[in-house]
Amino acid sequence: MSEKTISLDLTTEKLYKKAKEEKIETVWDRKKIMKAPCGFGEKGICCRLCSMGPCRISPVKGKGAQKGICGATADVIVARNFARMVAGGAAAHSDHGRDIVHTLYMADKDGNYKVKDEEKLRKIANELEIQTENRDIYDVAREVAEMLLNEFGKPFGTLEFIERAPESRKKIWKELNIEPRAIDREIATIMHSTHMGCTGDAESLINMSMRTALSDGWGGSMIGTDISDVLFGTPVPRETEANLGVLKDNMVNIVLHGHEPTLSEMIVLAAEDPELVELAKSVGAEGINLVGMCCTANEVTMRHGVKIAGNFLQQELAVLTGAVEAVIVDVQCIMPSLVTLSECFHTKFITTSPKARIKGATHLEFEEENALESAKNIVREAIENYKNRQREKVFIPQEKNHATVGYSVESIKNQLTRVMNSNVDNSNPIKPLADCITSGVLRGAAGIVGCNNPKVKQDYGHIEMIKKLIANDVIVVTTGCSAQAAAKAGLMSKDARKLAGEGLRRVCELVDIPPVLHMGSCVDISRILNLVSDVSKYLNVDISKLPVVGAAPEWMSEKAVSIGTYVVSTGIDTWLGVVPPVTGSEEVVDILTNRMEDMVGAKFYIEQDPIKAAEQMLQRIEEKREKLGI
Ligand code: SF4
Ligand code: MSK
């Protein structure tokens, strides 16, 4: 594979070339060794749920095994595998959310974790019908935390935050019996129903997948986002930079990678500690340069403007620069390959969570009870490693781009109302956005999210799709690695307005925003759900009728399968740029790409060419506009 074909990003090309020259293995080399993927796995027709198997179904109709030993058909096997992917993704996001709520429970005015956004906490407390008047804010915090922890295992009722959805949506969920109940319960139900000898009906399994996915989007992820805002502050627009060029030759470089802000927030504080800054100087550096990778980068850039080193496929490349003293990780999207790769350099690969220990890594467990001290110890480890940097091995590509980030729902509403205040009725902060859509100045909105995947030229899917959409007056909101691709490509700079169509450009100029808005990490897709719900309620039309689309052009993780499923179940058509492992079942393909529309008013589209996908999205947006008569 040549460096030209693996990525759209010049820094990736350069560092991949370096890896080749130094005979260091990367994700692309392992992908090549893997040769053609297993045809059964690719189609989802391999089952190893019991020891009568493993069973694999012949992909040729009428030839070879058409059923597993227990009699399970390809439809059942594919649907069970899909459901388990959803459960895996929902578990990851929701366990993240649960940890954040635990932190809120521990929060104390004299402790390391404090309530930073009291207004948001009071708003959530009101929603949960928890008294706030004349109460200490930390008492309120504990009661909110207890109630939200209960959302994971409560024996009766449905999730509290689904009340935020428009009535029309809740009605659909109720009729289909996919209103999510307790979060852990939905995940356990999938694991039970997909056990050998349980559900043998593909449609029922996809229904259960929708309910479990909704417990992620409107449950675990939404809780994770909201409580992170309460603890660490609701993001507001701020400036940052993105790409590996943010690493500094003369500083202690620390890459923060993973997902949960409980760790990264404390590392941010520790890196500003005067004693540690002094220590960095005493070892010959000019200071500490903290940068982010993957969703941790999104969390800390949204709240502090910490610079973004890169997205998923750049984690190995950061180490390959030879200039990173430590990669500090917590959970999710961390390649175990970082162990051997770090051994080729002086880099310390530090794991911190008992949920994601990796053999060969330095494990410094992050103790939340002693959070700041614990974070300082981890940062100290990185500083002390600066002296081991081998100068002859250092190569930092200089490419980076400027980005304006920090677009929480609150900051989008603020920005819109503040700027457009003079000529609109200010009674509903969502009115200006809704007006721009109904008048046709903006044709619609698109949420572009998700990972990188070495099956796709890195960032190509994200960037080509986004460019096509903004050129056609569709405002784009992004999260996850997609947001980082956009930031690296300069699409989050206000200058990128020049790439937008006339209507979107006018809105960007008036409101002073870039055409692509960074809404945060993967759990923050819940922000998009809240925003779309607000527009739906304001216009009094169901979400499925709005000119709004979603896409994950380079997705790779189970979390993305859960996300796609809850976004579609919320009524938003979603395009996948990587084919999911379901093509071994005509019925499952039919449900996902056709019948789901009759159930929830939206469906999946599979299109590997991002430009064609964007054209389909634009067409769908226009169809919806026509039906709405706007
Ligand atoms: Fe085979 Fe059925 Fe067992 Fe799966 S559950 S491995 S299809 S016998
Ligand atoms: S980090 S899930 S690679 S978006 Fe959220 Fe990026 Fe995908 Fe991980």
Image: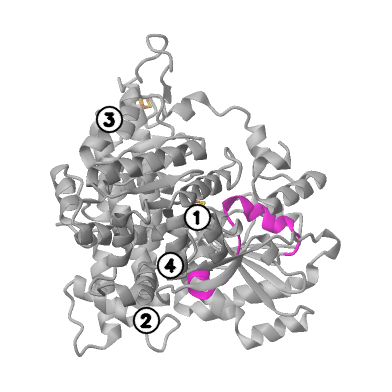
Q: Earlier in the sequence, mark 3 or mark 2?
A: 2
**Circle 3 sits on which residue?**
202
Say few, some or many: other residues with alpha carbon within 10 Å of mark 4 (under 14 / 14 to 19 / 20 or more): many
Q: Which mark is residue 407?
A: 4
As for residue 20 lying within the magenta part, the answer is: no
- Which of discs 1 and 3 lies nearer the camera? The answer is 1
Q: Is residue 164 above or below residue 48?
A: below
Q: Is residue 138 above or below residue 236?
A: below
Residue at 39% of width from left, 66% of height from top? 99
Image quarter of residue 361: bottom right
Tell me the CA gap for discs 1 and 3.
Answer: 43 Å
Q: Earlier in the sequence, mark 3 or mark 4?
A: 3
Q: Earlier in the sequence, mark 1 or mark 2?
A: 2
Q: Nearer the viewer, residue 416 or 313?
A: 416
In terms of secondary structure, where does tag 4 sit? loop
Q: Is residue 413 left or right of residue 595?
A: right
Query: Can residue 158 be spotted in the picture?
Result: no
Q: Earlier in the sequence, mark 2 or mark 4?
A: 2
- Which of discs 1 and 2 lies nearer the camera? The answer is 1
Some atom of ligand 2 lies within 8 Å of the CB belonging to the residue at label 4: no
Say few, some or many: other residues with alpha carbon within 10 Å of mark 2 (under 14 / 14 to 19 / 20 or more): many
Which quadrant of the rendered structure holds the N terminus? top right
Q: Outermost residue toward the top?
A: 63
Q: Is residue 318 left or right of residue 425?
A: right
Q: Nearer the viewer, residue 604 or 435?
A: 435
**Circle 1 sits on which residue?**
500
**Circle 2 sits on which residue?**
115
In terms of secondary structure, where does tag 1 sit? loop
